[in-house]
Amino acid sequence: MAASTVLVTGARAPVALHLARLLHGAGRRVILADSPIRPIAAASMACASYHRLPPPRFATEAYAEAVEALVRTEGVVTVIPTCEEVFYLSRLWQDGAMPARLFAPDMALLARVHDKHAFIRLAQSLGLDVPETTLLQSDTDLESVRGHSREQVFKPVWSRFARDVLLRPSPGELDVVRPSPAAPWVAQRFVDGEEISAYAVAIEGKLKALALYRSLYRAGKGAGICFEPVEDGAARRFVETFVAGTGWTGQISFDLMREPDGTVLPLECNPRAVSGLHFFRDPQRFADAVLDAGPEVKPDVTAPQTVRLAMWIYGLPAAWRSADLGRFRQAMRDAGELLDWPGDPAPKRAQWRTLAEIAGTALRQRISLQAASTRDIEWNGPDQERSS
């Protein structure tokens, strides 16, 4: 019997590479798709074939047509998104005509949790503790919180990688914020404590995989590039309650804060894969849990994980600025290279080509490397015109 075919999208992301390796190791035929020319996962021996797609943010209809043709031609059984293309795929699946299963919730729920204000209200409605969060849609809304700006964090409702975040700004620093109904912001109480990131997989509200971790180094203010696993009962209860209350199916991730008294509060949600996936290395147990209704799979990696190239680009300058090179050296010694995989060395070499392609986009668009890495797949709410 031929192995069932799984399509993993977002092939530019290390999590897509990791997911492909897990599913391939469990006997699935894995094909990958994305819009870059040379995404890192396409170099993997786990990739049966790579298919370049139109950029969903800028060519939405062409993207939808290409995905549908790919699913039908390749006999895809399951499609697993890893990045923000999940929104474009969910919309494509809305009418129920696609022959494959999309491993993600419906569009309404995706949009609700991606919205930084609606997510907090949803968590609150499930009986979970949340930080005070105010929706800002006008200058009047902004003026109502300006006097307390030093105790708050300001961020766009539709954003990622901590982009444009103002952390406890002065009242005058808020002058750059121009909230509107089309481009809303939130003001959220600054939560002092220990940050915990959560990566989870759930099926119909039942938790199938959970990794809790903290970032030791980040790419700027955003994504972690060196991270270590943690355990926290309150964080697990939050995730369990949220996925059960929403009947979640698919991958989901949270930024949480543990206050000194042990209370865990949510900051925001990302309905996609994040770095916690790298703490799972057992292909069969992971595939059984996620695709075959098996029992919950536990993380089996205990060492910190990193991408060493990213550490040299982002971690070393951060360590230099903080005059803490000893900590940087220790992290580089202790952490495992998450791109390493037995018998599959090509992606580690391919990261240089991938970086060059992203750098080219950054130079042409005059944006940061991080912004360039997701520019063509970002989903910024129902009104996309303002972000194009």
Image: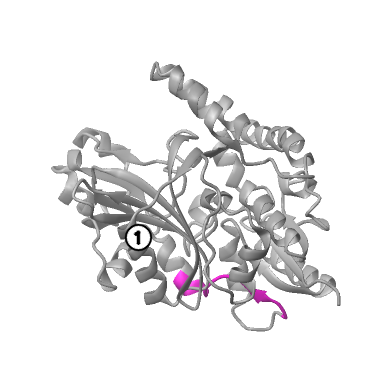
Inspect the magenta stretch and tell me whether residue 73 lies in it: no
**Secondary element at image label 1:** loop
Residue toward you, 210 or 44? 210
Q: Is residue 51 rendered to the left or right of residue 121?
A: right
In depth, the one of 185 and 72 nearer the eye is 72
Q: Is residue 297 left or right of residue 89?
A: left
Q: Nearer the viewer, residue 256 or 222?
A: 256
Quarter of the image for residue 183 reads bottom left
In the image, residue 305 above or below residue 31: above
How many numbered marks, from 0 up? 1
- Determine if residue 184 is in view: no
Query: Quick check: 116 above or below 100?
Result: above
Image point 46% across, 66% down: which residue?
Answer: 111
- Residue at the image position 68 percent from the left and 83 percent from the top: 97
Disc 1 residue type (three-letter): Pro
The way the protein has been coloured in the rendering is one colour
Return the x and y of residue 229 as percentages of the image width and height.
45, 46
Residue found at the very far bottom of the displayed protein: 96
Q: Image quadrant of residue 327?
A: top left
Which region is colored magenta?
A: 99-109
For residue 383, say whether it is visible: yes
Q: Position of residue 300 (x, y in %)?
A: 55, 53
Q: Is residue 306 above or below residue 257?
A: above
Q: Nearer the viewer, residue 284 or 132?
A: 284
Classify mark 1: residues with Cα within 10 Å, few (<14), some (14-19) or many (20+).
Answer: few
- Counting from the top left corner in percent of width and height, residue 281 is at 62, 53
| Residue bearing mark 1 | 181
Give the x, y percent position of residue 197.
Answer: 41, 50
Residue located at (72% from left, 37% from top): 348
Q: Quadrant of the N terminus?
A: bottom right
Task: Looking at this view, name the residue that lies furthest to the left.
Answer: 147
Residue sitting at 47 percent across and 61 percent down? 381
